[in-house]
Image (cartoon, rainbow, N blue to C red):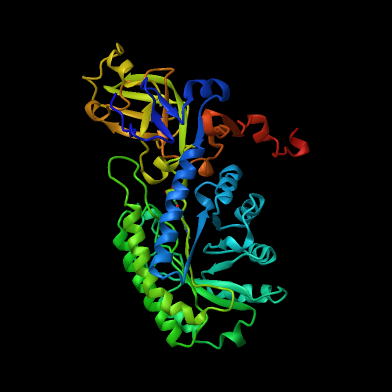
Amino acid sequence: MSSSVNPTRSVGFFRDESGRLSCDGADLSALAEEYGTPLYLYSEAALIAAWTNFHTTIAEAVRHASHEAAEALVCYSLKANPHLALVSLLRSLGAGADLVSGGELTRALAAGVPPEKIVFAGVAKSQAELRQGVAAGILQFNVESESELADLNAIAEGAKHKVAVALRYTPDVGGGGTDKITTGRAGDKFGLSRETILQLVSQDLQHDFPHLDFAGLSVHIGSQVFDTASFRSAWQKLLRLFQEAHAAGCTTLRRADLGGGLGISYGTTPAPSLNDYAAEVASFTKDFTPLALPAVADAETPLVLFEPGRRIVAAAGGLLTRVLRVKDEAGRRFVLLDAAMNDLIRPALYGTEHRLEAVAPPVSHQKHTGKPTADLAGISVAGPICETSDVFLPERAPEQASAWSQLQEGELAVFLDTGAYGATMASAYNSRPPAAEVLVRADARHKCITPRRTVDSLMESETIPSDLL
Ligand code: LLP
């Protein structure tokens, strides 16, 4: 079996000297025994490494390009993985939080994220969510509609301070990995056009929105962005809008929220380099700082905000699964796992693929005496859910399926890079309780951070009307 796990990788999922796949030295077979499968595993060391790398590089780029006049604030995007343990770890490393719901706000606060490091984004926040954010005293709301602005102004009336807002700009630059996760184009539901923003900030803001502080502009063009030139186009447009807004009389704008979206490698195509991204950040910051400085009040510095999710948490996570059945039918092999689309929906929803690696060393597969694959038309990897869409790796010719064509019944394998948008998008479809979650810590110690739920616990909140009992 060929391995796509980087043998030089020293944190996260890598093969040990014996060739077995491990998570920071923890024995995956033992974890499967102890907690059962499917099981999400997170490497604490990989999460720390990804955060530190991103934060250090970006903070330095902002500091340097602004000659120490501006600062970066990195707000981890909770939607990628909102688990309290992971958010608490990131918070302990200095992370802020980017969130899109009252639920995520509750989680960020429960994980101890300071309100002054919290940004509340989201295309349509409810009145209750706006109230919750104001009551918590968060750093800023990224506002996406005129009526939201009016509602927030009304809610902010009772607050001690003006409530800070950043208007989310739609630059008409798309950048996402697939159509479904591209957000920056005109016609997408997100943000406000240049015209709307200019018309808004040209008003007598003191008069029309006396309880709001127009602190900045924000932009987010999509997720799993691979081309750093897309960031450049969007951010150049954002800079022009800062200039135009200033010329229109809005002199308070001092924060630029550049969103998230930096992609990771899910396979053979290398991810955009953090240094290339940082170079774009530096180039933006250089021009942004002089625009923002005049707007800065006493205790503040111009702020460049970031909302990374996937880049922080994806590679730290893996979904451990066991092969339930292997069957050859109609000239095709189906490798059927105990993980399903309810555990990891990205392949079914977006048609994307996650690398699947056997836990056993590659050598044991060379000795494999199982059924030959040569005559097969194709091999696919699927889950047990009763839907054709429950396929993780669609059919390919045996020679192109080398990494998983030899998987046998009872074997363990891991879907790599599933720390982001994995467990958080899980459901209980087919009455399958979502996978348990385990955090692998230093010295291969491990801690169950979400126990496996029972079907009874799924049914607990359901009520049968008395006449049907
Ligand atoms: N900020 C905003 C306003 C966002 O909408 C998102 C992601 C992020 C930050 C974080 O983006 P990241 O750095 O993680 O790319 N479920 C999809 C991804 C949806 C992303 C939605 N917004 C997937 O599994 O690929």
Occupied quadrant, residue 193: bottom left
Taking 394 as reference, is 435 left or right? right
Occupied quadrant, residue 225: bottom left
Extreme residue toward the right, this view: 466
Residue 465 percent location from the top left of the image = 75, 39
Residue 348 percent location from the top left of the image = 41, 41
Total numbered labels: 0
Residue 22 percent location from the top left of the image = 43, 27
Q: Residue at x 31, y 13 (%)?
A: 370
Taking 111 as reference, is 60 left or right? left
Task: Please indicate, yes or no, whether residue 430 appears anywhere in the rendered image.
Answer: yes
Quarter of the image for the N terminus: give it.
top left
Task: Please indicate, yes or no, whether residue 172 appears anywhere in the rendered image.
Answer: no
The one nearer the camera, 175 or 215, is 215
Residue 467 percent location from the top left of the image = 77, 37
Taking 85 as reference, is 349 left or right? left
Q: Is residue 460 above or below residue 410?
A: below
Q: Residue at x 39, y 73 (%)?
A: 238
Q: Residue at x 63, y 58 (%)?
A: 114
Quarter of the image for the C terminus: give it.
top right
The one nearer the camera, 248 or 392, is 248
Extreme residue toward the top, this view: 369
Q: Is residue 395 above or below residue 352?
A: above
The one nearer the camera, 431 or 355, is 355
Which quarter is ligand 1 in?
bottom left
